[in-house]
Amino acid sequence: MIATVGAHGGLRLEGHKERSTETPIALAPPPECAILPLDQHAGMRAEPVVKVGERVMLGQPIARPQGEISAWLHASISGRVATIEPRPAAHRAGDSTLSIVIESDGRDERWPAHTSMQDFRERDPIVVLEHIARAGIVGLGGAAFPAATKLMGALRSKDCTLLLNGAECEPYISCDEMLMRERAHDIVLGAEAIAHAIGASQCVVAIEEGSSLAEATLREAVSRASAGSIRVAIVPNVYPAGGERQLIATLFGREVPFAGLPTDIGIVCQNVGTAAAVAKWIQDAQPLVSRIVTVTGDGVRRPRNLEARIGTPFSQLIAACDGYTERMHQLLMGGTMMGIALPSDDVSVVKATNCIIAASALDLQPRAAEMPCIRCGNCSEVCPARLLPQQIHLNARASDLEGLERYGLMDCIECGCCDYVCPSQIPLVERFRAAKPELAKHLMARSNARDARLRYETRNERLERLEAEQRQKLEEKRRQARTRSP
Amino acid sequence: MSVWLALLLMSALAALAALASSFAASQSRARARDALIGAINDLLPQTQCGRCTYSGCLPYATALAEGTADINQCPPGGDTTARSLARLLNREAKEVDARFGAMPATSMVAWIDEPACIGCTKCIQACPVDAIVGGARFMHTVIADQCTGCELCIPPCPVDCIDMRPFAPRFEAASSMRPQR
């Protein structure tokens, strides 16, 4: 059955997955030197718990979370902490960010202190959830939102549905597809553990139509699962069907409220890769120290999927794919629609690195000169968030923050559909991305002002009350003095 | 006789109606005025710094509603606020008057040199938004997240241990990280 309710816009894009799915997932050799940025998850950066010069082992915690939205970071190789300093990072488009650098000792010794939890079905759900939180697992679909934080949010709703996102709609990325083909059992085990931890009665795994091999193995794994409440759903091959909100709209016909979260309507969504990472932790006590990365594009000789340690330099993964072709033109992290262009391959794999594209001119066409907006409205027809990109664009040009807010800039998921169809070749998403921090600052200032006003008003009330009390006391004293004196 | 009675009754009724309608009109005028003051106050930055020469944002909003203040008296709000005020009040837009103080380029917050603080509580009393904590003869400190940068705590300090420092936000702008939510 193909579900098609409630989704808006989107594009049918030509697929390019088959290039990287011909060979099975290969293990990339552990790096000589792993670079681990402290802010590779959404939220607050982690705080180092190791010192420079200290010996660390594979899987040893090296930075702990700060604040509610944050995640643990673990050593992905054994060796010595060489330095803790700013290094260029892929998720910052090549800008430097504070990172822990580990030099390998080549022994790959495992940190012995982690324990597995294979008997999770008999444990208290909250214990399982806390156990998952220690693995440093983040959403592996690309957003790197700390998984445990998201699952905690699900506890608020009484009975929620666990939605596992295997709809990998970006045309080049195939890491989830390969994961489902080769490690469907891990996904099912992870799904069971997560469902137990959050008390979800139902679980749906969403995959795109056309990935028949992945579908077959997944169905087989689901049928063998002990709990029979996992369902496989197929979604149409429309970009961006795999966006969290879009997927929920497609499958359930329900819209996540504006400024709300999926848990508000009783759904918690995790990537299939995240579920597999949970399974690794529950079963083998292995925290998130590696992930599957698609290395593809016309600019690389042997496109394939590699299981790489977090912190492996991109250059090493490219070398594991027999290097660049002479047509190599541009390096991207992520897909062709939403990826980040990188100035060099001298950056390392982070938890969010689902794909590395070495693009030639055949993959990415150079943008022609920008022309004025002709108000054709194509952009608003394809916008999956039901926005009016042309209006946002006009307001962004005029730096009208109120207008940007009114037209819902913050709801833009930066999928790139509007950009793709714009006949005037306006780099819309680039503009929106640039305007977002300014608007976020404005919204933050306004909410701060609201708080300051509340405190100011409360303070004034308090001062008035104190003054009245003082006056009353004085009055009382006077009266007493008067009654005594005559 | 009955004619006079009827006339008297009717005029009494008319007077009553006139009174009631004038009361309602004044009531609705007051409501409109309150709504206008509220709308103006919503646009102000709520620093409560008093640079506009009024004692806080609400008094300035009231003066604007009454037409006794100009729209360009709020340096913390800057030209953006002046523009929004001009639009709301249908007045001519103008830049902030430099006589009311300089517009801050970056947001600044008060910072107490804690070893030097003698615990006199004078700054706590001066803070319009309760952003300073501490007790008598104990060290005081500024809750940086809640400080509006009004500088009202600086003059009362007898040991001059407060200065203004740029505020480092707790969250870095992760512009290249794209949450899919």
Image (cartoon, helix red, strand yellow):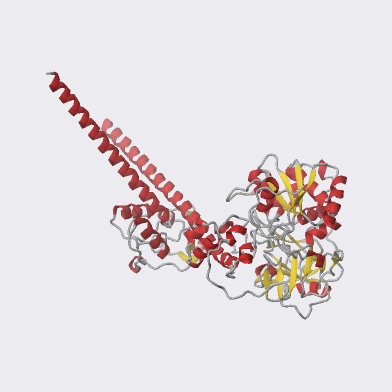
Q: Position of residue A166 (x, y in %)?
A: 76, 55
Identify the residue at horizontal 51%, vertical 62% (top origin).
Answer: B115
Whether A486 is drawn above or below A223: the answer is above
Q: Position of residue A121 (x, y in %)?
A: 82, 42
User: Which residue is more in the foreground, A253 or A107?
Assistant: A253
> In the drawing, does residue A230 fall left or right of residue A383?
right
Q: Position of residue A46 (x, y in %)?
A: 68, 61
Whether A206 is drawn above or below B111: the answer is above
Extreme residue toward the bottom, this view = A326
* Number of marks drawn: 0
Q: Position of residue B132 (x, y in %)?
A: 48, 55
| Image quarter hosting the C terminus of chain A | top left
Whether A456 is drawn above or below A121: the answer is below
Q: Is residue A42 visible?
A: yes
Q: Is residue A151 visible?
A: no
> Toward which corner of the image does residue A59 lie, by quadrant?
bottom right
Identify the residue at horizontal 48%, vertical 59% (top origin).
Answer: A403
Identify the residue at horizontal 82%, vertical 58% (top origin).
Answer: A179
